[in-house]
Amino acid sequence: MDEWLRKSVRMYNTPGHAHFLTYSCFKQRPFLKSATAKGWFIDALANGCRRHDIALWAYVIMPEHVHVLVKPRLVQYSISKFQASVKGSVGMRALSYSKASPKPEEYWEPYYDFQPNGTRHFRFWQRGGAYDRNISDMSDIPQVLTYIHTNPVRRGLSSCPEDWKWSSASFYAGGNPGPLPLEFPGF
């Protein structure tokens, strides 16, 4: 396995580093399958980048996980706070949506984490933070972009990266920037 791909749960706020992040849905369920849920993530990511002054370099939204490549602009930053704002926003919108939904409660059962004491918690995302890989060497960026953008192709969701509309691949191919404002990393 390539060194840059190894997953870690430790977060390092190192000035000048980019962050390759992966968020997984609870129990790897396809909660991001619908355009509505993908829209929640797009809104949350755009707001999180603005709020925490973080440049978005790349993303892909898959049915059960997302990958993002971001670069904080500030010397002092907290990637954990950024992630909490993004994931928290999506989770809250999903919970509100479930409460207002006319669908029967059984429909929402996959979102519940049942505890041994009988309580249950609504979960959109896997527990904990996210997988965070600091990218300190900008020469690794093309490899990270390829990994992110070929995700839908590897999964059989599209025939080429640019065809997956829930990704920044078309931006890098010289096409449509998609639903999120991106910054070219300039590697």
Image (cartoon, rainbow, N blue to C red):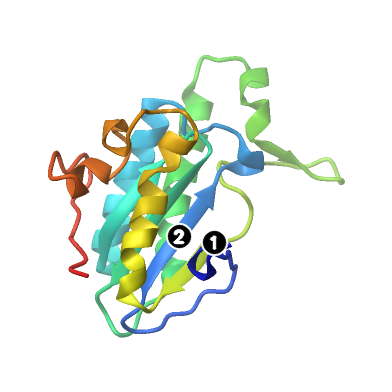
Which residue position is annotated with label 2? Answer: 21
Residue type pointed to by label 2: Leu
| Element on which disc 2 rests | strand
| Element on which disc 1 rests | strand
Q: CA distance from mark 1 to mark 2?
A: 5 Å
**Is residue 38 found left or right of 22 in the rendered image?**
left
Place residue 74 in its image quadrant. bottom left
**Is residue 22 found left or right of 120 in the rendered image?**
left
Give the vertical position of 72 relative to 172 (above or below). Answer: below
The residue at 24%/61% (across/down) is 50
The residue at 13%/40% (across/down) is 175
Quarter of the image where the C terminus is located: bottom left
Residue 118 numbered mark, or none: none
Q: Which of the two residues, 2 or 33, is positioned nearer the viewer here?
A: 2
Q: Residues within 10 Å of mark 1 (few under 14, many from 20)?
A: some
Residue type pointed to by label 1: Tyr
Q: Which of the two residues, 91 or 164, is positioned nearer the viewer here?
A: 164
Return the x and y of residue 153 as percentages of the image width and height: 42, 35
Give the vertical position of 149 relative to 79 (above or below). Answer: above
Which residue position is annotated with label 1? Answer: 131
Return the x and y of residue 57 as percentages of the image width and height: 27, 59
Q: Which of the two residues, 17 or 151, is positioned nearer the viewer here?
A: 151
Callout 1 touching callout 2 (CB < 8 Å): yes
